[in-house]
Amino acid sequence: MIARFLILAAAALLAACSDSRPPAGAPVGGDFVLQSAAGPFDTKVHRGKVLLVYFGYANCPDICPASLSYGGQALNKLSAAERERVRLVMVSVDPERDTPERLKEYTAFFHPEMIGVTGTAQEIENVAKLFGAGYVRQPTRPDGSYAVDHSSQTYVVAPDGKPAARLDLGTPVDKIVDAVRKLL
């Protein structure tokens, strides 16, 4: 009964690719290992780097492209030496359709150094809980397509692996760059 209520509450809070905020007091951050096209992506291996972690999916019609575009522009404003110390990671909330290869192709459109990662449905759920990110897969439409409603924040993880900031959708590129440079 409680699980059903929580699912209904989450569905009510999330609109298709909308700017839905995680619940107040939600846990934020933690290490994870998910699959990229280059193999396992382990946050512990990236200690010493600033991680920008975003939850989305390749078939998202609007929020993901906007958010990832801002992230890619922010990476472009960093020097090559600064970019060496930053990773922009999109965690797929659609493991049914988003393979590591598909995510590599999708994220490269926004920036060649962006990394797309996925895993099993349970692994994605666990990582989303670490960051307080929300998502809900919508029912399949008659044409076979479906949407995944999801939160739209980008989580900034400091080089020590601890959460440093949460950037809302539409955060100006210069503010993203400032948030990153503050941690380099």
Image (cartoon, rainbow, N blue to C red):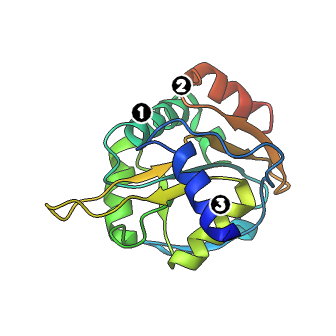
In the picture, measured across the screen, residue 80 lies left or right of residue 146, that is right
Q: Nearer the viewer, residue 12 or 63?
A: 12
Residue 120 placement (x, y as % from top left): 51, 79
Q: Nearer the viewer, residue 125 or 64?
A: 125
Read off the residue under disc 3: 6
Read off the residue under disc 2: 170
Relative height, residue 123 to residue 140 (above, below): below
On the question of residue 81 being in view, the answer is no
Q: Amino acid at mark 1?
A: Ala
SS under mark 2: loop
Q: Amino acid at mark 2?
A: Gly
Q: Nearer the viewer, residue 1 or 112?
A: 1
Give the mark nearer the N terminus: 2 vs 1: 1
Cα–Cα gap, marks 3 and 2: 28 Å
Label 2 with label 1: CB-CB less than 8 Å: yes
Q: Residue at x 31, y 58 (%)?
A: 105
Residue 2 placement (x, y as % from top left): 70, 68
On the question of residue 49 being in view, the answer is yes
Read off the residue under disc 1: 66
Query: In which quadrant of the rendered image does the C terminus lie?
Result: top right
Q: Give the mark toward the camera: 3 or 2.
A: 3
Q: Amino acid at mark 3?
A: Leu
Residue 45 picture quarter: bottom right
Residue 66 placement (x, y as % from top left): 42, 33
Residue 7 placement (x, y as % from top left): 58, 61
